[in-house]
Amino acid sequence: MLPGPSLLDAELRHLLREAIVEDRSRGAFKVHRRVFTDEAVLETERKVIFDHCWLYLGHASEIRTPGRFITRRVGGRPLILNRDREGKLHAFFNTCSHRGAVVCRERSGARRSFQCPYHGWVYDDRGVLIDVPGKDAMAPGLVESGEMNLVEVPKLGEYRGFVFINYDPDAISLEEYLADAKAVLDLVSDQGEAGMEVVGGTQEYAVNANWKLLQENSADGYHAATTHATYLDYIAARDGMSDNTRRMADPSAGRNLKALPPGEDLGHDNDFNRVRDLGNGHAVIASIGAAPWGRPYARWVPGWGEEAKEEIEEIGRSVVKRLGARRAELVINGDRNTLIFPNLVINDIMAITVRTFYPVRADRMEVNAWALAPVGESASSRDRRLRNFLEFLGPAGFASPDDVEMLEMCQDGYRNQLGMEWNDISRGMLKNSPSNTDEEQMRVFWRRWKKLMSPADAA
Ligand code: FES
Ligand SMILES: [Fe+2]
């Protein structure tokens, strides 16, 4: 029997040990619903996951020039990310060394110093305490000692413009942590000859559901046919009923369509249209030319009109010239929903969305999302990208509110735990090569989750 309503330490350990059941002999994979509802589980996640994994903080384009900064809450902590006058990145805990007030209240901007709003202490852009009002009342040398400077987050790393932090000073390097997910970040970043940039600030919304439900949902190819039927109807009405739309509207069809020639994929083998375990709890569902939507970079659909066709074909030719035919095919025609453990999603589909979500309670999360686009793309291409956000990815698009609704309904359903205690995540479990409508990508997440949450058991 799994524990009852109040979790004492021994019960919590028992729950964490038993919460994931993988039975290959039956092809069954179960997740206990208490991991979505219990505050004691969330507290453990904060300690063993969010305080030790690399967490996405922002994109280098948001602080492109010296002096730029953004403030952001990461894993529950307010931080400042800035580029100092010499161009070096810093991630500071956003808290004053005097009595703790948040030093910088602005969301973004440019400054060479930060003045705490409470008593006015001033720190420069390298975190050095440079001025204290009424300094004469302080002991000589105390302000200059350095012990009251802003404190930097133990680890800061950047991979192709994606900036991450880690609260664990002993953590492995970012590159090692990202493992094969680096290949996905490469494919995203390769779209911009002059780099990539965040467009239009941060999209923010909150969902009354456990944070892990959005990680599952963000690479769930199975739900498109039902949850996103409205979107698929819209696409069919606008562009005509294509084979791809018909297939996506039928979850029984699967989407393993086309194999690439060997040697040019995510670095594994030649079968691209399937789930990939990218290591360390990261996974991707990927396909080539199998999705019904247009990609501003650079896959045309009829709804964009004949006048857009020539420009999109020209973008395609320039990508082939720059990257070669095989890699260009992945960049132009590949759709990828990527999960980077624990809570970063990079969906490179009808547009590119970068999304994080943090728990505020076991049954509530706050979502931040950003649109990523090639630097210098044309106004018409940018317009198609933003329209795709409106049509699917944005907080008020055709898709995101539908997803939010489903996640909140799951969370509500978890109130019924008497005899209805387990989620099933076993789809495609006995296949050699699970497809995009299977659930292997979620099992990759959950195996990692279990390993961190119940290390003795994993050993
Ligand atoms: S708390 Fe910042 S100056 Fe006092
Ligand atoms: Fe969805």
Image (tube, rainbow, N blue to C red):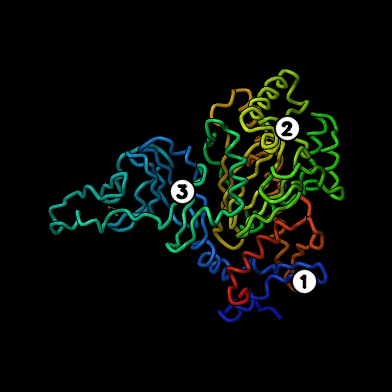
Q: Earlier in the sequence, mark 3 or mark 2?
A: 3
Q: Which residue is mark 1?
A: 23
Q: Gap in Å between the C-alphas at discs 1 and 3?
A: 41 Å
Q: Secondary structure at mark 1?
A: strand
Q: Is residue 9 above or below residue 134?
A: below
Dot 2, crowdedness within 10 Å: few (<14), some or many (≥20)? many
Query: Toward the viewer: 415 or 193?
Result: 193
Label disc, if present, on residue 428 of the rendered structure? none
Q: Is residue 405 visible?
A: no
Residue labelled with disc 3: 72
* Residue 319 falls left or right of residue 419: left
Q: Residues within 10 Å of mark 3 (few under 14, many from 20)?
A: many
Q: Earlier in the sequence, mark 2 or mark 1?
A: 1
- Residue 233, by quadrant, is top right
Q: Give, as a three-letter code, the residue at label 3.
A: Arg
Residue at the disc numbered 2 = 294
Which image quadrant for residue 22? bottom right
Q: Quadrant of the C terminus?
A: bottom right
Extreme residue toward the front, this view: 263
Q: Position of residue 19 (x, y in %)?
A: 68, 72
Camera-side mark, 3 or 2 = 2
Question: Do we see residue 245 in this rendering?
Answer: yes
Disc 1 residue type?
Asp
- Picture coordinates of residue 85, whole percent (x, y): 32, 39
92 or 348, which is in the foreground? 348
Of pointers 1 and 3, the one earlier in the residue sequence: 1
